[in-house]
Amino acid sequence: MTRIIMHGANGRMGKVIAGLVAADPDAEIVAGVDIAPGDAAFPIYTDLADVKEEADVIIDFSTAKIVDHLLEAAVAKKLPVVLCTTGLSEDQLANVRKLSAQIPILKSANMSLGVNTITGLLKDATKVFGSAGFDIEIVERHHNQKLDAPSGTAIMLADAINAAADGQYEYIYDRSQRMEKRGKKELGISAVRGGNIPGTHEIIFAGPDELIEIRHVAYSRSIFGNGAISAAKYLAGREPGLYDMNDVIAAMQQ
């Protein structure tokens, strides 16, 4: 049984994960943390440092501004963290890397098993199509309540592409001020926000006379919740270090 502290318990993802864990015989949420009031089947605290219940791992779906405090409290409690919050600054990312020497941290911009499997496909595709001179673009669409643009997932996908190309690509977010042809090593990243569009990511490989598209659509937040729970089960009991969803997927294949 994996005992979980849900950080961001009263948020949309916190409630989704609580519902999923309630039906999972191998996991239990023993406590939650949230600044907002709410009802739950477990005690909810306003600060992780105040949590009295014994736990194996923390799942975090909160906001970037409180991640530093979360990690400090997690280090004090010696608890692993599944860090799902996006929009972290470069300083915060550096802090994540630093603190991963003290506790296990699994960080991913997207917890979906589908998206994380696609990153592997993109690396293979880039080695073929990038070398052949294909143009690469990413278009992401989300509902009008999403705060960050482009999405953390879009950047994660772009980073996977760029890693396969030895960092040759330049990320381009806006061409409105550029009166020139598209550069060979541009990687365009476009964000659409509107209505209640489900999270959608399209990766386009455009070459002479052919077009290849890889597309992922998230129809429910449950896919992120299930991924986070799988990550929590994987991370509990691990040695300190920085992990990602590829580690979880690799463990599933064993």
Image (cartoon, rainbow, N blue to C red):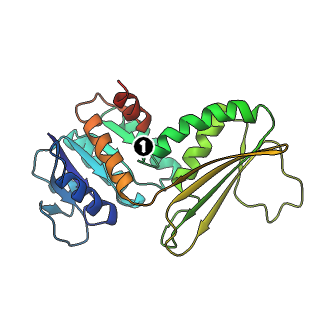
Residue under the point 15% across and 65% down: 40
The answer to whether any part of residue 63 appears in the image is yes
Residue under the point 46% across and 57% down: 218
Where in the figure is residue 97, as x and y percent of width and height?
Answer: 43, 37
Q: Is residue 192 left or right of residue 56?
A: right
In the image, what residue type sits under mark 1? Leu
Label 1 Cα neighbours within 10 Å, binned few <14 / some 14-19 / many ≥20 = some
As drawn, 173 above or below 209: below
Q: Please name whichever residue, 37 or 141, is drawn nearer the observer in this view of the structure.
A: 141
Q: Residue 101 falls in which quadrant of the image?
A: top left
Q: Residue 129 falls in which quadrant of the image?
A: top right
- Of all residues, the one furthest to the bottom in this rendering is 195
Q: Please name whichever residue, 19 or 209, is drawn nearer the observer in this view of the structure.
A: 209
- Of all residues, the one furthest to the right in this rendering is 180
Where in the figure is residue 193, as x and y percent of width and height?
Answer: 58, 70
Where in the figure is residue 29, as x and y percent of width and height?
Answer: 17, 52
Q: Please name whichever residue, 247 or 76, is drawn nearer the observer in this view of the structure.
A: 247
Residue under the point 35% across and 46% down: 227
The answer to whether any part of residue 8 appears in the image is no
Where in the figure is residue 177, as x and y percent of width and height?
Answer: 82, 64
Quarter of the picture containing the C terminus is: top left
Q: Is residue 30 left or right of residue 33?
A: left
- Of all residues, the one furthest to the front in this rendering is 209
Q: Residue 221 falls in which quadrant of the image?
A: bottom left
| Label tally | 1
Indicate the secondary structure of the residue bearing disc 1: helix
Q: Please name whichever residue, 239 or 211, is drawn nearer the observer in this view of the structure.
A: 211
Quarter of the picture containing the N terminus is: top left
Query: Which residue lies under the disc numbered 1?
Result: 113
Residue under the point 74% across and 35% down: 130
